[in-house]
Amino acid sequence: NTDFFKAGARPFIFQEVIDLAGEA
């Protein structure tokens, strides 16, 4: 199921960006 992975990977990357912004 690529759809599930796509939907689960996007929020994960978004969380990484938020984490990076919080560190900076």
Image (cartoon, rainbow, N blue to C red):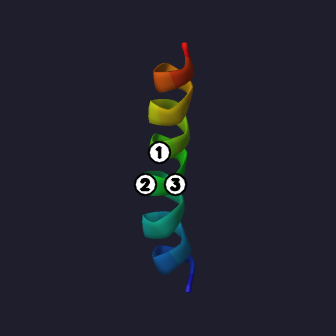
Label 1 packing within 10 angstroms: few (<14), some (14-19), many (20+): few
Which mark is on residue 15? 1
Please name the residue shown 55% across and 21% down the image.
23
Label 3 packing within 10 angstroms: few (<14), some (14-19), many (20+): few
Which mark is on residue 11? 2
Residue 13 in percent (x, y) is at: 54, 46
Which mark is on residue 12? 3
Q: Amino acid at mark 2?
A: Pro
Quadrant in which the N terminus is drawn:
bottom right
Q: Which one is nearer the viewer's eye here, 21 or 7?
A: 21
Q: Are marks 3 and 2 in contact (CB under 8 Å)?
A: yes
Disc 3 versus disc 2: distance between alpha carbons?
Answer: 4 Å
Q: Which one is nearer the viewer's eye here, 11 or 4?
A: 11
Q: Amino acid at mark 1?
A: Gln
Which mark is on residue 24? none
Q: Are marks 1 and 3 in contact (CB under 8 Å)?
A: yes
Label 2 packing within 10 angstroms: few (<14), some (14-19), many (20+): few
Quadrant in which the C terminus is drawn:
top right
Q: Secondary structure at mark 2?
A: helix
